[in-house]
Amino acid sequence: MLRTSLNMDWELGNGWTISSITGYQETETDRNIDVSYGGYDPLTYLAPFYAPPFFDLAGSFWRVQAEETETFSQELRLSSSADQRLRWSIGAYWYDSEFKQTVDDRIAPLTSFDFLLDPAQSEQRPNSYPEVRNTENTAIFGSVEFDFTDSLTGTIEVRQATDKIEAEYLNYAFTTGDKFEEEFDSFTPRFTLTWVPSDSTTIYGNVAKGTKPGGFNDPGTDQVSYDEEEAWNFEVGVKKRIFGGRGTWNSALFLIDWTDQQLTFNAQRPDGTLTSFIDNVGETSVTGFETELSMMITPNWDMTANYSYINSEIDEYTTADQAILIGCNSTAEDYYDCIQANGSVEGNQTPRSPKHQASLRTMYRFAMGAGEWFVGGDIRYEGSKYAQVHNFAQTGSRTTVGAQAGYRTDRWAVTVWGKNLTDDDTAMDILRYVDSRGYTTVGGPPCSVTGSPAFDPEANCGPFFARSGSNIGGGPIFPRGFGITLPRGRQIGATIQFNF
């Protein structure tokens, strides 16, 4: 990884300032991935259908993935003097990113004999999925801040941006590949009103619009592209110093009106391998509350506690998955009518978002010799969260307890610590997946090559039905499975730190 930045300020004679922020970054990442999530080899359960010469076996890992990213950004800003009643700033921004990725699967369909007949294609590994994505963001922005009184200030901020996204793929069938290009224009304002009735209290409210540009999924899915998501955020809050400045209390109420929220789903390719794609959820509403309290109980004893409640509810979204889960038959004549009647997940919680989170941390210190002894602990709680929009599988709530004690000086420190002392093994996250050990086939062996020397996914596999995760034209159908992220068990250790 290479990361560099350059910040420059030029102060003009009238109190104005020109600021320049430049950034450049290069990253290279290599990953070897075992995609089973279950400690078994998926290849064993797919044989003998996936075998040479029509499929290539490529090593011990199911997937080897290499990524390269290069980004450059430049911002120029002109700001007025900060000590005036009316303050303003204007600026321009440019961002350019190139992302390259090559995915080599241990099992991947070949074009059969085509690559033997055309030596020029031998430079491309038959099981590779090369991908290049270019993202360019250009924007102009400005803000105006005005003090109506000594205690009341209003701020207006606006940003006009254009995101140009290009994606190019060369698929595993040695075809020329797919190239996609789209532009997304956005106008995002923010309005803030701040009231400071006393030196110890600040009350604020703001309304802001945010966007996230759309993009493109892998060509292996039937969801080629997804739209830009948009959210209006409404928030009111208070920040207060309490008990003579020995403590602070911050709280906020917020509401988010979300349109076309982008969520990631899993789907099965016609060849039986798994992929993911992004789809837009029509409407989502979020209401929430956050509060945090920090206190110096004594000069040697401090405590911090916080709690958040977030109710994120889907208001509008219909998916074939939901209809199939409650009984719609994908081979029935009235299948699409059944989806419209039974595929709505309105009222369900958005996945991977707990309603309740809380934590409590405390530390006690006392001086001795050239340093100080310390002892402390923390408790963290996270409510249950759902794996998918269907709201069936969920993690369950989890509570972890930690503790630490030690001695430190300006030069060195020794700490004895414990993490997850109750050995809570509740899942941290759940990813909808498939279980290759329980597959069945529809219409014969997966993507059979009968009658044609060349592999043609559309002809041999039938349409890819991403919504149900099945391949109705012929091939393997896997039962649902889940990839579970488990927490580390109980840990007890010691750390020695020395400052040179």
Image (tube, rainbow, N blue to C red):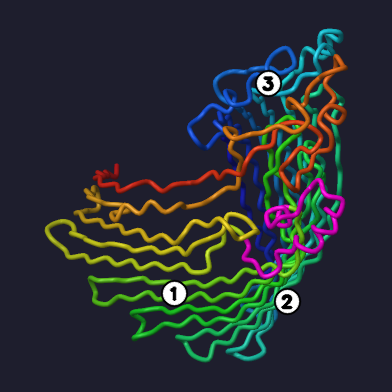
Badge 2 amino acid:
Ile
Q: What stretch is highlighted in magenta?
A: 321-350
Q: Nearer the viewer, residue 124 or 126?
A: 126
Q: What mark, if any, has residue 50 been given in the picture?
A: 3
Tell us which disc is closer to us: 1 or 2: 1
Which residue, given by chain and number where applicable, does mark 2 sit on?
156
- Please, what secondary structure does the residue beneath circle 2 have? strand
**Residue 315 in the image: x percent, y percent?**
72, 70
Tell us which disc is closer to us: 1 or 3: 3
Q: Is residue 78 visible?
A: yes
Which residue, given by chain and number where applicable, does mark 1 sit on?
292
**Residue 399 in the image: x percent, y percent?**
37, 61
Instruction: In the rendered view, tell whether residue 253 sits above or below residue 71.
Output: below
Q: Is residue 89 visible?
A: no
Closer to the chain start, of discs 1 and 2, is: 2
Tell us which disc is closer to us: 2 or 3: 3
